[in-house]
Amino acid sequence: MSEKNLKKHTVTQNKYDSQNSIRISLNLNTKTDAPILAKLHQVPSMSGYIRSVLFEDIRQNNPELMEITRFEKSSDSVSFGRPSPNPSDTFILPSSNSPSNPAKKKKTE
């Protein structure tokens, strides 16, 4: 692939990713999460394995979620696209600095 075509491909891929992907980062502790880390390093695709485990959990415990066709996130709400839209499919998320989100509280010491 020529440099020009590679740049065009990268721009196109970045645009697609920004419209259709959400990156999730996860911190795992090398001591307390050692079994998880060991398992993730045994599988050919960590991302694929995590997805398969989550899909299996959804199928067993929340099969209605399998109807969701699109996930939309804005700054203050999350909507789930379904074949037949339902107003109750939008949820308000707490802001990242609200008291209901203890992980984001600032230390005041």
Image (spheres, rainbow, N blue to C red):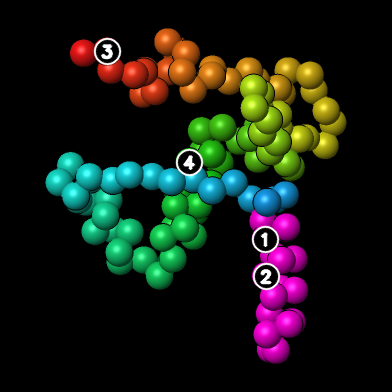
Report the residue marked by disc 2: 10
Spatial separation of the CA atoms under disc 1 and disc 3: 39 Å
The residue drawn where x is 44% and y is 52% is 50
Measured from the top left, where is residue 53 in percent x and y? 45, 49
* Image quadrant occupied by the N terminus: bottom right
Amino acid type for the residue under numbered disc 3: Thr
Query: Which of the numbered marks, if any, corresponds to residue 108?
Result: 3
Report the residue marked by disc 1: 14
- Secondary structure state at the residue bearing disc 1: helix
Spatial separation of the CA atoms under disc 1 and disc 4: 31 Å
Amino acid type for the residue under numbered disc 4: Asp
Q: Earlier in the sequence, mark 3 or mark 2?
A: 2
Up/down of 91 relative to 66, above or below: above
Which segment is the magenta one? Answer: 1-17
The residue drawn where x is 38% and y is 45% is 26
Q: Are marks 2 and 1 in contact (CB under 8 Å)?
A: yes
Amino acid type for the residue under numbered disc 1: Asn
Q: Earlier in the sequence, mark 1 or mark 4?
A: 1
Spatial separation of the CA atoms under disc 3 and disc 2: 44 Å
Query: Which of the numbered marks, if any, corresponds to residue 57?
Result: 4
Residue 33 in view (yes/no):
yes
Nearer to me, 37 or 11: 11
Query: In the orientation shown, which residue stands out farthest toward the bottom?
Result: 2
Query: In the orientation shown, which residue stands out farthest toward the left?
Result: 31
Spatial separation of the CA atoms under disc 2 and disc 1: 6 Å
The residue drawn where x is 41% and y is 60% is 46
Q: Nearer the viewer, mark 4 or mark 2?
A: 2
- Secondary structure state at the residue bearing disc 2: helix
Q: Earlier in the sequence, mark 1 or mark 3?
A: 1
Amino acid type for the residue under numbered disc 2: Thr
Q: Earlier in the sequence, mark 3 or mark 4?
A: 4
